Amino acid sequence: MRFVIAFLICCAASVAQMPDVKGDWVLTIVRFGEPDYTRLKLESNNGHYTGKIWSGVQLDGVAKGSTLEFQCSYEDDDKQRKACGSLSVSASQDEMKGQGKMFDEPATISARRDMPQNGTPRTHQFTPTQFHRLFSGNIEPALHINPGDTVQTKSVDAGGVDEKGEHRSVGGNPLTGPFYIEGAVPGDTLVVHLNRVRLNRDTAGIYNDTVVGSAVDPYYFRDLKRVKDFDSSWKLDRAAGTAMLTKPTDRLKDFKIALHPMLGCIGVAPPGHQAFRSGNLGDYGGNMDYNQLREGVTLYMPVFQPGALLFVGDGHATEGDGELTGNALETSMDIEFTVDLIRGKSLGQPRSENDEYVMVSGIGGSLADALQSATTGMSRWLEEEYKLNAGEVAMVLGSSMRYDIAEVVDPQVHVVAKLARNTLAQIPKPK
Amino acid sequence: MRFVIAFLICCAASVAQMPDVKGDWVLTIVRFGEPDYTRLKLESNNGHYTGKIWSGVQLDGVAKGSTLEFQCSYEDDDKQRKACGSLSVSASQDEMKGQGKMFDEPATISARRDMPQNGTPRTHQFTPTQFHRLFSGNIEPALHINPGDTVQTKSVDAGGVDEKGEHRSVGGNPLTGPFYIEGAVPGDTLVVHLNRVRLNRDTAGIYNDTVVGSAVDPYYFRDLKRVKDFDSSWKLDRAAGTAMLTKPTDRLKDFKIALHPMLGCIGVAPPGHQAFRSGNLGDYGGNMDYNQLREGVTLYMPVFQPGALLFVGDGHATEGDGELTGNALETSMDIEFTVDLIRGKSLGQPRSENDEYVMVSGIGGSLADALQSATTGMSRWLEEEYKLNAGEVAMVLGSSMRYDIAEVVDPQVHVVAKLARNTLAQIPKPK
Amino acid sequence: MRFVIAFLICCAASVAQMPDVKGDWVLTIVRFGEPDYTRLKLESNNGHYTGKIWSGVQLDGVAKGSTLEFQCSYEDDDKQRKACGSLSVSASQDEMKGQGKMFDEPATISARRDMPQNGTPRTHQFTPTQFHRLFSGNIEPALHINPGDTVQTKSVDAGGVDEKGEHRSVGGNPLTGPFYIEGAVPGDTLVVHLNRVRLNRDTAGIYNDTVVGSAVDPYYFRDLKRVKDFDSSWKLDRAAGTAMLTKPTDRLKDFKIALHPMLGCIGVAPPGHQAFRSGNLGDYGGNMDYNQLREGVTLYMPVFQPGALLFVGDGHATEGDGELTGNALETSMDIEFTVDLIRGKSLGQPRSENDEYVMVSGIGGSLADALQSATTGMSRWLEEEYKLNAGEVAMVLGSSMRYDIAEVVDPQVHVVAKLARNTLAQIPKPK
Amino acid sequence: MRFVIAFLICCAASVAQMPDVKGDWVLTIVRFGEPDYTRLKLESNNGHYTGKIWSGVQLDGVAKGSTLEFQCSYEDDDKQRKACGSLSVSASQDEMKGQGKMFDEPATISARRDMPQNGTPRTHQFTPTQFHRLFSGNIEPALHINPGDTVQTKSVDAGGVDEKGEHRSVGGNPLTGPFYIEGAVPGDTLVVHLNRVRLNRDTAGIYNDTVVGSAVDPYYFRDLKRVKDFDSSWKLDRAAGTAMLTKPTDRLKDFKIALHPMLGCIGVAPPGHQAFRSGNLGDYGGNMDYNQLREGVTLYMPVFQPGALLFVGDGHATEGDGELTGNALETSMDIEFTVDLIRGKSLGQPRSENDEYVMVSGIGGSLADALQSATTGMSRWLEEEYKLNAGEVAMVLGSSMRYDIAEVVDPQVHVVAKLARNTLAQIPKPK
């Protein structure tokens, strides 16, 4: 009897079949208590399983019973494959669990099948009751939504005042959200289509009475004669689509400008559990203050946290390039957007599209850094989307690129590289 | 009789009346062998003569016989008037000569009446035989012209090749000119209207096969896979107004872009007897490489040397923002321009106008410096032309300013601040 | 009897005297759920109570019974006092509570007496078991200490490896701490004296094999011939105080450099509930990578969160200026420091002192920004500590200032402005 | 007889032997009227002559009678040799003359034997009577000297005032020189050893009363309270080696600083026939304003024009890093220097040495550019002088590099990369 049992156990072990683990997974890798999230598309070939996770690390596995023994490796700068750990994983149809070492660090791993939501897109009315002044993954989601869903919501102005003139938050770009997008995993791209970005009150305020010091010559700035009690509030004529100073000076009594409502802040939770003030910006978007982020634009942002955690706010009735007054015509806003998800692919920085242009956002510590980032992002996008080589990229950029200086007044500077859609239309897009 | 004559001469001298020296003069002030040039508008009041020369120095004179005794003074940073020398000048109707001290330095002074040319404007056909690779006041003028005159001429491409494909100069932006504008004095503004900027051959060349290193991330640049023998020459279809690569790669075989012929180089002799390579740029203009300096544009440049000394060259069939390939679609050009002069007034940096925009050029060592210069220039122009105060300037710029990044590849960076003419049209222009 | 008591109570209430609220308080002001912390020193004068809180807001109160009615005001840019709210506060000897409006926002206020700890300083042995890769106020303190206390602890290297060669954390500057300093309030200065910064193992690693791309010309960087499998690990001879490459190349076989152990990371929780990766830096200190932050140095840092929350880590055996290899001779470290607190006073950015110099850290997005911040910080410090006017500051800086470029490789750049102590010794220090 | 002579002549011509043209030449290549100068070391091998001229162009020649037929070629970025012209040259022992095409441009060539002066070094007393405010190759040399020679001379202060307090020039860094160094050819290195840099009067002046606007935060600068009539002149105690304010304020009445006399300006004629104001700087040196350019220093500068054309001036009694007051303790100076020449070798930017350090000057439009240039220059110097590879350079710089910020106030910024001599002493210097 003991023999039989022993035999059965033995056989059970030896004949335990590896379930079919091919396909798409979402992994959580925990090292020293810190989780990382990544996708894994496992391909199988003759009992070997292969796939890639973050940072170009490749897993190569063989099944031993229901256990997968993975070797980890990566390609170094010299294009040589280097070992970087091993994982022993027990797998079922829908779940994997295991442990091992990665980069000499003990790692535990768990995985679930990636199952995209395929339900009918919904439209959510979301009335914010609380506002946040951080881009952060530590804030409880205000709403969970699916790719394909639409949200109709509102934002208060940069000072925390809503469409009725009521104070709703401490000032400093209070944000609506965060919206948790189901299925979003670091390494994905969140797509946000701005269906509506509309004014919902008749006033806006520039909070300064001179241009900012960093945008002009220091001696000019020093010798500037400031006007006592200059009133820089604006009256919005939504029907006519124009704005004028609320109390125009004599010289500006006919100065009427077109409204171009836009969102100053739109971003996701930044990488690495960081939290940045809502006045900040980076590859996660944020306080981008770009006057082209208007109704009709589609914005593509990297996902850095599970669920992406989308925030919106800081509406401007209109804004000059550079946001030279440090803020623009700050006002509250009615917003409607539809989200989508591009799985397992990310440019690593914001990109946006309108009817005329494809625009890549470069955000950095200086104008030079921001411009380098924007140009590099556009170059990479052309390489990836259009399979252009370095010479071809140079010909397209050298002949046809345009830059916008989005803003020069926030903690990071924002420069946009853009190409006209009708220029791009002349390059065939590979399948 | 001799006695009488002698007496008459003597008396004539002693009672010699100061001629009417009111009005406009051009002064040359020489200190330690170095000449400076400046305008002087003398106003008279009860035997006192007053006027301003460079750097805000004021002359206050009283006539003693035919001699004017001038005291020099200036306003310091605290708005206090400080003495800075004196000059003793003998004046006739049309000429003054004298000497004294300015800023503790011995100075001799000579002046001639400023007599604007009032002749009929002429049109000059100028065929260049020699090209210059410097912006410099030391180069013999190729042609003297009057304000109001028009010049029809040609430029070779940046490599020195003309419309027939012949090498005419060493490469490096060889320039046509210089043109001496009669009556131009430092402190004036030279106005150049570009009547025609037209292609005169069917080829253009980008001389590089990648974007420049300074415009992209250094690691991206390092890892760029350069294409061996990439052919970056272009074929121009002047009739259709388009350009294609001469030998297009498979992926760019349909890539056809619009021609927007422009002048990369347009500038005057720089200040202080300096000479800069024609690849350089500054407040004197130069290798500005701004893709909006096209046919139809009017350019305003400070005058730094007598005669201004205008140079043109470096035609581009078209150019992306930033001139990311280090040069653009370099080609030879047919050029026609009309010059004019604004006397005694200068923004100190280039400004240009087309149908849509007023544009101020900021040129500096970094993007930040260039942007500061452009914004400051636009602010000053609004103060001067529209009499706006600091608060009003802030409202206009904060709501309506646009920036262009002209180029980031030359020894100095060029950023342009611009305002739409229809925005400016809403501000009344004071008399 | 009951009547008498009731009467007494009643009367006591009705004639309730304001307790003596003069002196030092710590306030918490909550608006829309967000707390702010600030000190308040109340002075009393004839029934009026006056004091200042953050951002220069002044409270002016009158007692009505045991209630203090405060008017809030601030001085605007034109030095005019402007009202900004009012608070109604009920006060006991040791506590205040109240509410009102500040800047149009509803505010609740609570306060406790500021009671400095006066106990005997203690020495804490702290052995870290967990490491953090964020500078953040959201992390549970590892240890609470008092001003005057000393901590003896250890740090792992930037890759997470300890003195025994064991992996203890994911890499990326894992930090020891945070240490909560009792009594520290935003607006204070945390003083950290580095008693000991000592190596505790014989190996260190530079993780790169070239200088970083941002510190050299992009074409030089592109054309650099990288050495395959270059071993950039170092062997430390602690007895001799020198380091050599572990496997020196032939040309560097005699290359022996002095050890100057330092802390790359030392910082407090950043302002506004933000959390920054431990590779980041700012006015809160952080990954400052300054090779003068060694044993014997005293560091002064602004307090942004209650308790300050001090983190340390990222030891370098030595480091060149700029940290040109992106990291330095990374190693684990034995650390001993003593903390102190300067109440209610802050330069707003890190300052440090050694035997030779007083050093002010400027941290910014570009070298230009960092230099501006360092120079401004040093100027302000001279104004505050030595009561110098603008002319005197200019004379001292123009004749005697020194700069160090601490690092140019992290997300922010770090430039240090420094003045020799023997220069400063010639300026009398006012009481 | 005439026939015979004619025959002899004819034959002589036809059998004319190529003279021995091996060895060192100095070439002048003229294209379109513009001369370029370069060295050529011809090596001969079996009737083939080979040598390199500027820009890496190689000449490969074969003798046909007394004519050398050269093919020109260069190595492209892909290390492939490309043809770039041909020259036909008739040569005698001491002279060559010829013509051909280079880079499709007609070229005439002339050459003379390079004959280094081997005479006894001389010492020249040079009393300047004229001063120049340009670094330019168009200025007539004030003195011709040989490598090895010593010059004893004087400079006026930046305002043009000499040691007796007399105005000798318009202000703005008037320069002494230029000194023509016999035998110097573009591509060489001029060596200047500063034997004496001594004060010759007891006064110095800082011409400003605040720090410059670009070195501090713009809001700090705007709000700076300037001191009316602040006297920023200094009294020099040459015996004691110290300086104090001439009219010290109460707070600076004990402020006494050490004198470290230095030259703000030292440079050669810039490349390409350019002329730069003496306030400018670049790879030609110029207004470098580096407080380590003192007595005892040896400076190495690229030669860009025949004779190099050395200028000196702008003495400072001492200067803080950055030259934060826009100028330093400006004064006149006694100067003695000895020159030497390194033939055919140039780092392309200034390098200097004192007892402690080897220093490479990076000069650029921004701090970032200047730092990149300095680091690149030091890296290249280590590669060339010590034959280090990229990994070794990284180890040396990452562990041991120091930076100085020389100045941030001139038209170009100056950053210095430096390595201690005792660090370098540990790397063997190859023959």
Image (cartoon, coloured by chain):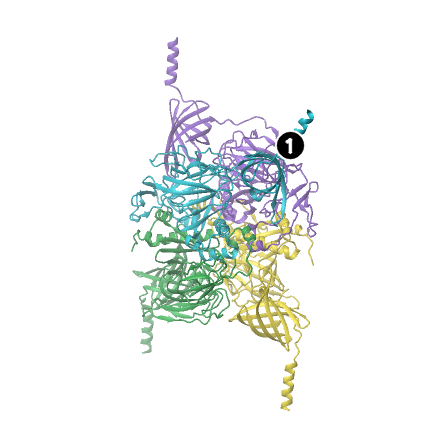
Chain colours: A cyan, B green, C purple, D yellow
Residue A245 is left or right of residue C375, and the answer is left
Residue D261 seen anywhere in this rendered image of the structure? no
Residue that numbered label 1 is attached to:
A13
Q: Nearer the viewer, residue B158 or B3?
A: B158
Instruction: State the SS at label 1.
Output: helix
Instruction: Where is residue B202? Give x, y as percent.
Output: 44, 66
Residue C300 seen anywhere in this rendered image of the structure? yes
Q: Nearer the viewer, residue B52 or A211?
A: A211
Residue drawn at x 38%, y 41% is: A315
Place residue D102 in its image quadrant.
bottom right
Q: Nearer the viewer, residue C324 or B394?
A: C324
Instruction: Where is residue C327? Give x, y as percent.
Output: 60, 44
Chain designation of label 1: A
Place residue D335 in its image quadrant.
bottom right
Amino acid type assigned to the residue bearing label 1 in the image: Ala
Quarter of the image containing the N terminus of chain B? bottom left
As displayed, is residue A201 above or below residue B306? above
Instruction: Where is residue A279? Give x, y as percent.
Output: 44, 40
Place residue C3 in its image quadrant.
top left
